[in-house]
């Protein structure tokens, strides 16, 4: 089994925007989508594995949700978790004072 087996790659903002455009295009033809909102997560939680690879755990919409999920994950499944900000394309520390003011 290779070191990259099962890894989820980080999606770029470009891919997210194109997905949103496709969904919006189809929504015009379907009244079912008129009252639904589409959430595009701003943050992704990754776990750093012992071999140095990152594995995507889940996506969250905002910094508060990220803090809550990281707290829960650290209790239920201790690991080295990192938060990826898709708008800046960087890992961020949600527990720093500057991250909470976003």
Image (cartoon, rainbow, N blue to C red):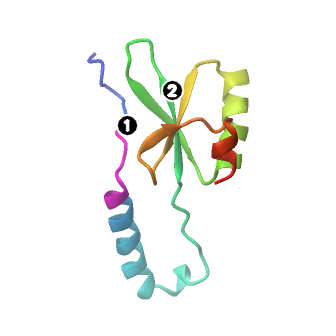
Residue 66 position in % (x across, y down): 65, 43
Separation of marks 1 and 2 at Cα, in angstroms: 11 Å
> Compared to 16, does 84 lie above or below?
above
Image depth: mark 1 or mark 2 in front: 2
Residue 95 position in % (x across, y down): 68, 35
Residues in magenta, as a range: 9-15
Q: Residue 54 carries which label?
A: none
Seen at 28% across and 16% down, the residue is 1
Q: Earlier in the sequence, mark 1 or mark 2?
A: 1
Spot the residue most to the front.
98
Q: In which quarter of the image is residue 3?
A: top left
Q: Is mark 1 on a helix, strand or loop?
A: loop
Residue 61 position in % (x across, y down): 60, 54
| Residue 58 vs residue 14, the one in the foreground | 14
Which residue matches tag 2?
47
| Residue 19 vs residue 94, the one in the foreground | 94
| Residue 81 vs residue 33, the one in the foreground | 81
Seen at 64% across and 39% down, the residue is 94
Residue 38 position in % (x across, y down): 54, 68
Question: Mark 2 packing: few (<14 Cα in 10 Å), some, or many (20+)?
Answer: some
Which residue matches tag 1?
8
In the image, taking residue 6 as reference, residue 44 lies left or right, namely right
Q: What element carries label 2?
A: strand
């Amino acid at each position: 089994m290779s070191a990259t087996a099962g890894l989820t790659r980080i999606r770029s903002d470009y891919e997210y925007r194109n997905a949103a455009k496709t969904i919006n295009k189809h929504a015009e033809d379907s009244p079912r989508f008129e009252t639904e909102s589409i959430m595009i997560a701003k943050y992704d939680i990754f776990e750093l594995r012992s071999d140095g690879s990152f594995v995507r755990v889940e996506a969250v919409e905002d910094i508060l949700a990220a803090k809550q999920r990281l707290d829960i994950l650290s209790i239920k499944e201790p690991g080295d978790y990192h938060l990826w900000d898709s708008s800046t394309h960087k890992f961020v520390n949600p527990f720093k004072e500057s991250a909470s003011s976003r």
